[in-house]
Image (tube, rainbow, N blue to C red):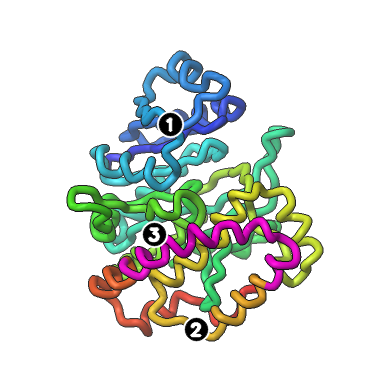
Amino acid sequence: MKVAVLQQVYKSRNYIDAVYGAIFAQTYPDITVYAQIVNDEGRSRAYIAEKYPQVTFLEPGYNIGFSKGHNEMFASIDADIFQLVNPDAILAPTFVEEIVTVFRANEKVGAVSGKIFQYDFSENKAKTTFDTTGVVVWRSGRGRDRGQHEEDTGQYDTPGEVTGVSGAVAAYRKAALESVKMPRSNSYYEYFDEDFHSYWEDVDLSLRLINQGWSIWYEPKALAKHGRYAGSSKEGYKNVGKFARHHKKISERVKQLNYKNHIFIVVKNFPKYYWQFWFRELAMLCYIIVFERSTLKVWSEFRSQLVVMKQKRKFIADHCKIAPQEFEKHLLGGLGL
């Protein structure tokens, strides 16, 4: 199977040697590496070209966004598997080999990720806490990376199905992507939802894959490290004080995208709106009014996109290949606070 390793280069000069050194240390032989330059701060392109001449460059000429940038790569690159690697993600040498083994073993697997640990680039030190072992989603619409902030005690050593994969190190089967692409215009299709721009587009894509009958898989033998910027608060809304302090570290735009896009994954993909969704949204709105009023600036954008999202919901429902009861099996029943 031919694997294309895809990365958007965005202010990533300090990560290049660790990240690209790991990519070119992979034991799987059939790999081609693509770097899409969306921000060349620190002359990352020149450095990569000099030290890693095997890399093929793609240059849109502006910050194209995660969703649109990857869509253009999915559509234009010939490969069986697309392996995404964030600018701050470091793969273990056998990562791609383990991922390909899963795809070969089960033709219904549409996406795979592995056991991803947190990494501190400021100290060049791997942590023993998880970044993600797959994504879990509640009926309330909350999604989070399973195991994030937990110490590894072997609790996620068993491979199996998950509800989603984090886009930081996700691998997608080309055939699966083609089955869920959606028309954006008469001649252009999107895989990741470009109205999301960034954040939650990976969860949205995972749910659309499930609705098309694909399996999302977690493989603990595939190891990696990730220096995440906008992870979740450890205790969520259960500790409002810590949640507020955590959110102060996140940019206003990221908070706006998080708020808008998490609602849209429900609007697009859920077979119905569960009571847990309405309860949690009310709680979130109360929190935002008290602590984060700047997030409400996204409402004008939300309203303008809502009509389009409802159209996408109809498209997904019309093409869905599983029953609502089957989809519900992938959702957790609590509020996910």
Between residues 44 and 55, which one lies in front from this camera angle?
44
- Return the mark for residue 234: none
The quadrant in which residue 34 appears is top left
Q: Is residue 335 left or right of residue 329?
A: right
**Cα–Cα gap, marks 1 and 3:** 24 Å
Q: Is residue 308 magenta?
A: yes
Q: Amino acid at mark 1?
A: Tyr
The stretch of residues the image draws in magenta is 286-311
Q: Position of residue 186 (x, y in %)?
A: 18, 52
Of tags 1 and 2, the one toward the viewer is 1
The quadrant in which residue 12 appears is top right
Q: Position of residue 205 (x, y in %)?
A: 39, 59
- Return the mark for residue 62: 1
* Circles 3 and 2: CB atoms closer than 8 Å: no
**Cα–Cα gap, marks 3 and 2:** 20 Å
- Return the mark for residue 205: 3
Q: Position of residue 192 (x, y in %)?
A: 37, 53
